[in-house]
Image (cartoon, rainbow, N blue to C red):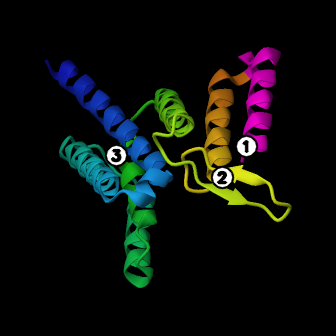
Amino acid sequence: MGKKIKKCAQNYIYIAFSIYLVTILLQDTSLYRISGMIENLVKFFKYACFFSFCIKILIDLMKKNKISIVMICMMVLSIIIYFSSGNKKLIILMILLLSLRDTDENKLLSISAKTYLITYLIIVIGSLLNLIPDWTYETLNGSERHSLGFYYPTITVARYLMIVLMYVYLKKDKINVFEIILFQIINIILYKCT
């Protein structure tokens, strides 16, 4: 029975992390910027994920899983930075690190890559179908740059790069020439659009 509970808890943290990744991507969309309802939903799910990460940390502490001195120092430092500057990103990072420290890195990266890819495709296809606003920006030479559902064109390419990097890392030396050519064709298309 104890193994089933541990496996369920591990899967629970992977699901929470996936939802957290979706909220991060949704924050970069044009829809998030114009819809208060979407913004509130994203914030709700993001805070629910933080809550679940904190629960995981507490469960780990109750199971006597040790937290290293370095992690404690980093957490104290992040709290000091928060109180001195108001920047909570380091605290969020520390909560993520503490809650995900006992997970399988390859499984976590695989889930991240799949979550990013699916969410990215939904955003871009939604933009192409006019379900999500495609903000355009005029360049100095008069051409248009499309955001493809994100709030700025460079975010579209940056998120694509993250997907490619995760894929390449997961495949390691098993990546073939066809995949590299496919990535480059998609890159050229995105470059032309954005």
Crowd tier of the residue under label 3, counting other residues whose Cα lies within 10 Å: few below 14, some 14–19, many 20 or above: many
Foreground of the two, 109 or 29? 29
Q: Are marks 1 and 2 in contact (CB under 8 Å)?
A: yes
Of the two numbered discs 3 and 2 in the rendering, the one whose residue sits closer to the viewer: 2
The residue labelled by disc 3 is 99
The residue labelled by disc 1 is 193
- Mark 1 or mark 2: whose residue is earlier in sequence: 2
Residue 150: x and y in percent read: 55, 50
**Numbered mark located on residue 14 in the image:** none
As drawn, is 181 to the left or to the right of 88?
A: right
Q: Name the main secondary structure of what is drawn in magenta.
A: helix
- The magenta-colored residue range is 173-194
Between marks 1 and 2, how big is the CA–CA gap?
8 Å
The residue labelled by disc 2 is 153
Crowd tier of the residue under label 2, counting other residues whose Cα lies within 10 Å: few below 14, some 14–19, many 20 or above: many
Residue type indicated by callout 2: Pro
Residue 101: x and y in percent read: 41, 42
Q: Is residue 149 above or below residue 163?
A: below
Residue type indicated by callout 3: Ser
Between marks 3 and 2, how big is the CA–CA gap?
33 Å
